[in-house]
Image (cartoon, rainbow, N blue to C red):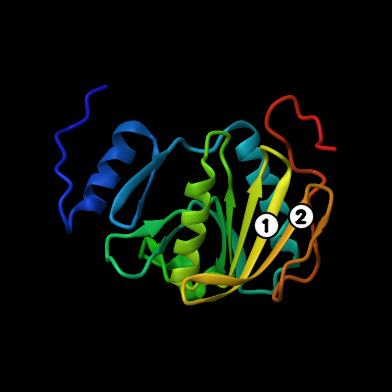
């Protein structure tokens, strides 16, 4: 496959990202003025997203729902955006012509860590969500069966952090009405649960 010649320069990174997505099928985000590419979710990664997306909508009030692959605008650079695996938004989003979500409209962003993701990349991405003011971020890690819930962003840092393991109840803040069952989430590898 041959990619067209692309010249990333300020103001056209989004065009470059869109062209890469079209040509390769990779998921592309722009974080801090840099293109970040990853394959689309599949296998246990996609299964984790599916299992979470089934649990969230039944407990949400009218006017909110869970959406996959919706991109959130980030501050500081008009080209920057991130695309969480799952995001809870007002249902008005379904009628919007814009492709970027206002971070203030996000009730929850969910990131499922890929098998090859590095710890520094995860930490940096959490900072982008906090800087954007996304009120609640859930990071699920099928590599070891861990999750972390981040709340109360201030000055680019989440002030509240709750860590847990698969099998622990995951208590989401309002408007969610009950904990998320994490015991049903798959692990990468042979699927053996951590001790």
Q: Position of residue 149 (x, y in %)?
A: 67, 62
Q: Is residue 99 above or below residue 40?
A: below
- Nearer to us in this view, 88 or 127: 127
Q: Is residue 175 above or below residue 84?
A: below
Task: Compare marks 1 and 2 and give the one earlier in the sequence.
Answer: 1
Q: Position of residue 18 (x, y in %)?
A: 29, 46
Farthest top residue? 1
Residue carrying label 2 = 164
Query: Along the horizontal axis of the image, is 54 left or right of 77?
Result: right
Say which quarter of the image contains residue 195: top right
- Nearer to us in this view, 65 or 170: 170
Tell me if residue 134 can be seen.
Answer: no
Residue carrying label 1 = 148
Q: Residue at x 69, y 75 (%)?
A: 175
Q: Is residue 165 above or below residue 22?
A: below
Which secondary structure, mark 2?
strand
Q: Residue at x 81, y 35 (%)?
A: 193
Q: Quadrant of the N terminus?
A: top left
Query: Along the horizontal axis of the image, is 27 left or right of 91?
Result: left
Are the residues tagged 1 and 2 within 8 Å (C-beta)? yes
Q: Position of residue 108 (x, y in %)?
A: 60, 65
Structural distance between the alpha carbons of marks 1 and 2: 6 Å
Say which quarter of the image contains residue 88: bottom right
Tell me if residue 20 can be seen.
Answer: yes
Q: Position of residue 14 (x, y in %)?
A: 26, 53
Which secondary structure, mark 1?
strand
Query: Along the horizontal axis of the image, is 11 left or right of 176?
Result: left
């Amino acid at each position: 496959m041959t990619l067209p010649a692309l010249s990333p320069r300020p103001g056209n990174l989004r065009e470059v990202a869109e062209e890469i997505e079209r040509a390769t099928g990779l998921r592309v985000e722009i974080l801090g003025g840099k293109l970040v590419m990853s394959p689309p979710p599949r296998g246990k990664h996609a299964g984790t997203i599916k299992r979470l997306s089934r649990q969230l909508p039944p407990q949400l009030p009218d006017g909110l729902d869970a959406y996959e692959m919706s991109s959130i605008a980030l501050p500081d650079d008009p080209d920057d955006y991130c695309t969480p695996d799952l995001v809870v938004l007002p249902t008005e989003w379904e009628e919007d012509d814009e492709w970027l979500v206002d971070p203030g409209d996000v009730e929850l962003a969910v990131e499922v860590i890929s098998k090859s993701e590095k710890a520094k990349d995860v930490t940096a991405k959490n900072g982008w969500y906090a800087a954007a003011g996304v009120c609640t971020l859930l990071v699920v890690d099928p590599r070891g069966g861990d999750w972390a819930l981040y709340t109360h962003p201030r000055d680019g840092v989440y002030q509240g952090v709750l860590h847990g393991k698969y099998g622990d109840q995951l208590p989401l803040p309002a408007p969610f009405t009950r904990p998320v069952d994490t015991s049903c989430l798959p692990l990468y590898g042979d699927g053996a649960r951590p001790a």
